[in-house]
Amino acid sequence: MKLKKGDSINELTLPSVDGSTFNLETIKGKKAMISFYRYSSCPFCHLRINEIISKKSEFGDNFVPIAIFDCDFDDLVKNSKKHDGEITILCDDDRIYFDKFEVQNSFLRFLVGITIRVDRFFKALLKGYNPASNMSGAFLGLPADILIDENGIVEKAFYGSHTASHIPLNEVVLFSKS
């Protein structure tokens, strides 16, 4: 089911790149942004994570950003090293939650994203995010950002219209502090 405001996310359990198993219960009582990303070395995805980390001091104290990738676990571990444990990065290589929450793939919207956001692509390359390193997963995937409150209730569900489309970070900061 495609998530919408008022829906409840009761369960989410996935392996983390830090070697642990993440369970949504561990953040009960905190607000979160659960972001669904593309493939393991996606430059758009890793640039977005880098931007989230750079805003970390602006987020409310009771807020957790979570990144979920659709790819091979070992490739994700290799490609996430630059983030140095600053964010929870999870692997859904069986597409359990991608399918459950209807996170889509689209060749046409992939082309739109790479065309209209070529600036972000080059910015990611300049930061060292190589799109071809350890590439596995949903190359044609579209992102989704889900803001949930302290009880796992969806406050906002944003399904990207192209590969570089996300909730603006200033909106995430406001949500984290509300």
Image: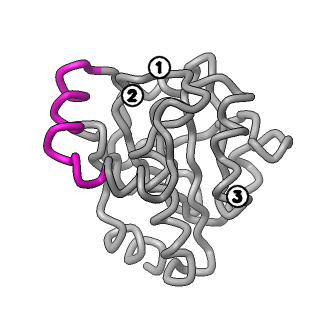
Task: Assess disc 3: are there few (<14), some (14-19) or many (≥20) residues with their C-alpha within 10 Å of its C-alpha.
Answer: some
Q: Which mark is residue 8?
A: none
| 115 drawn magenta | yes
Dividing the picture into quadrants, the one containing residue 85 is bottom right
Q: Which residue is mark 1?
A: 99
Q: Which mark is residue 27?
A: 3
- Between circles 3 and 1, the one closer to the viewer is 1
- Indicate the position of residue 127 as horizontal and vertical percent values: 47, 59
**Amino acid type of the residue that numbered disc 2 sits on in the rendered structure:** Val
Instruction: Answer whether residue 1 is visible to the viewer in this image.
Output: no
Between 162 and 131, which is closer to the camera in this rendering? Answer: 131
**How far, Cα to Cα, is label 2 from label 1?**
6 Å
**How far, Cα to Cα, is label 3 from label 2?**
22 Å
Q: Secondary structure at mark 2?
A: loop
Q: Which residue is mark 2?
A: 103
**Amino acid type of the residue that numbered disc 3 sits on in the rendered structure:** Ile
Q: Is residue 82 left or right of residue 25?
A: left
Kindly identify the residue that appears in the image at 49 percent across and 83 percent down.
58
- Between circles 3 and 2, the one closer to the viewer is 2
Kindly identify the residue that appears in the image at 85 percent across and 41 percent down.
19
- Indicate the position of residue 41 as horizontal and vertical percent values: 53, 36
Task: Name which of mark 3 and mark 2 comes first in the sequence.
Answer: 3
Image height of 34 relative to 150, above or below: above
**Amino acid type of the residue that numbered disc 1 sits on in the rendered structure:** Asp
Where are the magenta residues, as a range?
Answer: 106-120
Q: Secondary structure at mark 3?
A: helix
Q: Is residue 42 left or right of residue 170?
A: right
Q: Is residue 131 left or right of residue 83?
A: left
Task: Assess disc 2: are there few (<14), some (14-19) or many (≥20) residues with their C-alpha within 10 Å of its C-alpha.
Answer: many
| 20 drawn magenta | no
Whether pointer 2 and pointer 1 mark residues with C-beta atoms closer than 8 Å, the reply is: yes
